[in-house]
């Protein structure tokens, strides 16, 4: 769910009209095999880059591995985020992301115990 939201926000930001200074897309490669496998790569002239590949997962979902990057506003470097979205959820890695709070693993353990006991909240 987080991946879908992140992708939607990114697509909206990328698709927003740039009336005064249009940013050219310098690379646009897409392959959709129609069986749940795909890959794509986009790059823009201002340094934004996105790549992802998807394969069918054991539960019928698309397992996605990807990376996106963009330059820092002050020009001092590039932010890069690598991610995986699969049956275990969305996991992103980057030195620019804040660390996971210490209590989160304990909350995840409790949630797993509740699911195993048949306790769900819908």
Image (tube, rainbow, N blue to C red):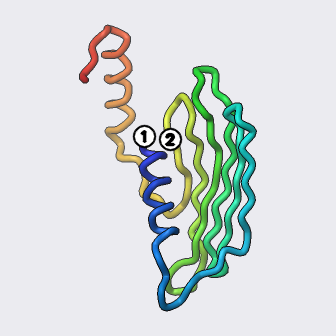
Residue 7 locus on image (x, y percent)? 50, 53
Foreground residue, 111 or 51?
A: 51
Determine which residue is flagged by label 1. Answer: 1
Residue 94 locus on image (x, y percent)? 55, 58
- Gap between marks 2 and 1, in whole Å? 8 Å
Callout 2: SS: strand
Foreground tag (2 vs 1): 1
In the image, residue 38 above or below residue 58:
below
Residue 90's label in the rendered image is 2
Foreground residue, 2 or 14?
A: 14
Foreground residue, 31 or 89?
A: 31
Left/right of residue 70 with respect to residue 41 in the rendered view? left
Residue 104 locus on image (x, y percent)? 35, 38
- The reply to whether dot 2 and dot 1 touch (C-beta < 8 Å) is yes
Give the quadrant of residue 12.
bottom left
Local packing at callout 1 (Cα closer than 10 Å; few below 14, some 14-19, many 20+) is: few
Left/right of residue 113 with respect to residue 32 in the rendered view? left
């Amino acid at each position: 769910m987080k991946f879908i939201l992140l992708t939607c926000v990114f697509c909206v930001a990328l698709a927003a009209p740039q009336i005064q200074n249009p940013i050219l897309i310098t690379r646009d490669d897409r392959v959709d095999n129609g069986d749940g496998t795909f890959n794509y790569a986009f790059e823009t002239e201002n340094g934004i880059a996105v790549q992802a590949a998807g394969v069918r997962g054991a539960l019928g979902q698309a397992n996605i591995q990807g990376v996106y990057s963009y330059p820092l506003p002050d020009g001092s470097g590039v932010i890069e985020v690598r991610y995986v979205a699969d049956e275990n959820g969305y996991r992103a890695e980057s030195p620019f992301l804040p660390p996971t709070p210490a209590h989160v693993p304990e909350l995840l353990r409790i949630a797993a115990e509740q699911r195993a006991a048949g306790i769900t909240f819908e």
